[in-house]
Structure formats: C-alpha cells, structure tokens
C-alpha cells in the first residue's frame, strides 16, 4: 500500500487525549492549525490521578483559555486546616479546586474545537521525519502531519518505539491512596479541606489531604512503602482501622470517621525519557517525565509543557519547511520547562528522603520540615 497517498494529512497529530494532549489540541486548533487527536477512549475514563487544581495550575489553565469550563465541575476550597498530633495548628486561606482527573480531562476535551478530528483508536507505529512524520493506527489508518505530539501518558511503549530511553530515577518511589470519607454520625464535615501530618518515621506516611469533591470528602494519602507491602493490603482490606493506626489523632481534628467505598492505590515510578529528540515528534507530559503527586506539581508540569510548546515552539516550527531533531531538543532544554521538570524531580526525591532516611542530614531536614509546617512557613 502506498501509505503516503493514503495518509490523512493535518498540521499537527496529537497522540493521546489526557490533560496534556487535549489541552495542546485545543490551543493549537484555536490558533487556526488543522489538528487530529488519536485516543483509545471517546470519553476519558475514571483514573486515579491529580484530584486538586492548585492556584498556579488554575492560572495556567486560565492563560490557556481552558479554566472556566473546568471550573464548572469543581468544588472551591477557600480554607485549609493544618493539623498534627491530634490538634489544629492553624488555618490558611487559599483558593484550590477539588475535581477528579477524568472530570478535568473531559471538561478540557469538551473545549476542543469541532473542526478537530477526534479519532478513537490505538496507535501501532510512529515514524519520525523532519518533513512528514507519520502515525499508523492498529486499524491501518495513516496520519501524516508536520508535527506529531506524543502525549500518551505513562504508557512507555510509544516513546520507547522511537528509541527513547527511560531513565528510571526511582523505581517504586511512593504510593498514593484515594478514597471517600464520611463522619460516623452522618453529619457533614464542618470544613472544606484539611492537611494532616503524622509522625513519618512511625507510619511512613508523609501527609494526607482531605478536600471536598462533589458532595463528598475525598482523601489522598501520600506514603512510602512498596506496592506489595502488607500495609497496602491492610489499607485496601480494612481501611478505617488502618487509617486510624497510620494517622493517629486525625479523628480529634475532623471527628469520628469511616472510609466509604473503594480505596484506589497508585504506585509512583519516577522517570524521565532520554535521547528522545526525533525529527517531527515531541513528547509532553508523562510521556516525557513522571511526577510524584505528593509534590503537588503534576498538573503544573503538564500545563507548562503545553504552554511552552504551543505558544513558543509550534508557531516557529511550523513556519519552517523542516523540523529536525535539533529543534525538538530545544524544547526539552527550554529554561522554564526544564526548571519545572527539575524541580518536580528534586522535590519528589527529597521528600522521600525526609520521610524514610535515618541519615543525619535528613533527620535535620525532617525536623526543619516539621517546624515549617507547624508555623505555616
């Protein structure tokens, strides 16, 4: 078959329609580019990922023209109670937004302009080229663009197909657990959000956060033990009692509670792709680098990728006749992108050490972190 003759041609092909891919497709289509999006799901499925939008992330979404639609599905958090040792330390004013990741993505997807072709399918192969990079689907459909954006999330198959190397910064860095919580007396919780820190050396839990999501109180627990650790099984099978053991004194801050519904675990492997500058193809979001959710930087990194790529690089790239690998490499090295990427890695690694390490420098840093948290610094 002459794939060149049969190819569907667009300016930009976006592979993957999570937050990164959907946002990039929307921004670029609004710039007047012809865009095709390829994803296995017509509607993004429930997936335990980032469940709060931080102030800097709301600002990034706003700057990309995406926030107002997303905001419709959020619960606004205006105050966070900070607690430790069974007591409230202080209250902090803020503006965060509680929303499930699938709701965030689907609200961004709803803003993709109607002229964008959204193809439900699975990508089989990627072929880099400085002038006409190609994407071939499992059903034989061929797309040809001037640029292919790979936003396929944590599935490393496609980046590795390009010859990119996954540098595993830390295998099994952390575990995150998400679940709903209710008061034992059935009354509503008298707050919008709580951040509570137990003794990390006793529990291997860094902190947990409670926040409104819809009409329920959602909990995220950030911990450091292997996925197959007995504590994981305990939390999945007997969550209320296990939470009380791991986070003593929480009930004195929020009242007697019971875990409701399923506990969702998420194992974090920290990685960054290397040697991934291929002509006509660029990796963004988790396709390039993962983030530990405990840092609160996951969506910051993704949206920074989208902003830098779509507003600084794509216009000049598509003004040229060719897009060699050196041009792609410039995106990965962009100062603002690189700063956020490096900061996300550094925070993730240092936080783990502060929780689990007995080395003197980390014992000192653990005490400093505890003092800063207690004093709202």
Image (cartoon, grey):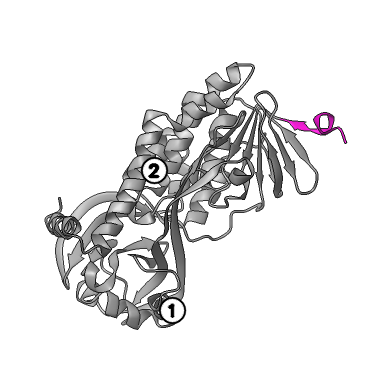
- Residue 113, compared with residue 251, is above or below; it is above
Report the residue at 57% width, 52% height from top. Answer: 155
The answer to whether 159 appears left or right of 125 in the picture is left
Q: Quadrant of residue 4?
A: top right
Q: Confirm whether the magenta stretch covers residue 263.
A: no
Q: Quadrant of residue 363?
A: bottom left
Q: Secondary structure at mark 2?
A: helix
Report the residue at 65% width, 53% height from top. Answer: 41
Q: Give coordinates of residue 46: x percent, y percent.
A: 54, 61
Which quadrant does the N terminus fall into? Answer: top right
The answer to whether 79 appears left or right of 130 in the picture is left
Report the residue at 57% width, 27% height from top. Answer: 325
Residue, disc 1: 233
The answer to whether 61 appears left or right of 157 in the picture is left
Report the residue at 68% width, 31% height from top. Answer: 133
- Residue 116, compared with residue 319, is above or below; it is below
Q: Viewer-proximal residue, 42 or 280?
A: 280
Mark yes or no: residue 306 visible.
yes
**Which residue lies most toward the top here?**
320
Q: Quadrant of residue 219?
A: bottom left
Number of marks present in the image shown: 2
Q: Secondary structure at mark 1?
A: helix
Mark yes or no: residue 186 visible.
no
Q: Give coordinates of residue 191: x percent, y percent.
A: 26, 64
Q: Viewer-proximal residue, 229 or 63?
A: 229
Residue, disc 2: 300
Neighbourhood count class around disc 2 (C-alpha, 10 Å): few under 14, some 14–19, many 20 upward: many
Q: Confirm whether the magenta stretch covers residue 8.
A: yes
In the image, which residues are magenta? Answer: 1-9
């Amino acid at each position: 078959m002459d794939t060149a003759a049969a190819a569907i041609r667009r300016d930009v092909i976006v592979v993957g329609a999570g937050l990164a891919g959907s946002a990039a497709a929307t921004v670029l289509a609004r710039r007047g580019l012809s865009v095709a999006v390829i994803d296995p799901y017509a509607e993004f499925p429930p997936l335990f990922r980032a469940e709060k939008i931080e102030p800097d992330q709301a600002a990034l979404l706003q700057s990309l023209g995406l926030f107002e639609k997303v905001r419709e599905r959020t619960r606004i958090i205006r105050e966070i109670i900070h607690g430790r040792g069974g007591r409230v330390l202080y209250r902090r004013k803020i503006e965060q937004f509680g929303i499930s990741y699938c709701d965030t993505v689907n609200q961004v997807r709803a803003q993709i302009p109607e002229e964008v072709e959204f193809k439900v399918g699975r990508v089989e192969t990627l072929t880099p080229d400085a002038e006409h990079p190609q994407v071939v689907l499992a059903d034989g459909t061929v797309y040809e663009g001037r640029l292919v954006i790979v936003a396929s999330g944590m599935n490393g198959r496609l980046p590795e197909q390009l010859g990119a190397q996954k540098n595993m910064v830390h295998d099994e860095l952390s575990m995150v657990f998400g679940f709903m919580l209710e008061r034992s007396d059935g009354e509503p919780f008298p707050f919008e959000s709580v951040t509570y820190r137990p003794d990390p050396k006793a529990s291997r839990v860094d902190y947990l956060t409670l926040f409104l999501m819809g009409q329920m109180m959602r909990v995220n627990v950030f911990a450091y033990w292997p996925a197959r650790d007995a504590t994981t099984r305990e939390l999945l099978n007997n969550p209320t009692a296990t939470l009380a053991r791991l986070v003593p004194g929480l009930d004195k801050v929020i009242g007697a509670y019971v875990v409701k519904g399923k506990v969702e675990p998420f194992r974090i492997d920290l990685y960054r792709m290397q040697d991934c500058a291929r002509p006509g193809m660029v990796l963004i979001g988790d396709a390039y680098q993962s983030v530990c959710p405990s840092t609160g930087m996951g969506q910051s990194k993704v949206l920074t990728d989208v902003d830098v790529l779509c507003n600084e690089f794509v216009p000049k790239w598509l003004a040229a006749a060719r897009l060699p690998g050196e041009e792609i490499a410039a995106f990965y090295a962009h100062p603002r992108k690189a700063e956020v990427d490096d900061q996300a890695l550094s925070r993730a690694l240092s936080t783990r050490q502060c929780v689990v390490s007995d080395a003197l420098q980390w014992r000192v840093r653990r005490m400093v972190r505890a003092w800063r948290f207690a004093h709202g610094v």
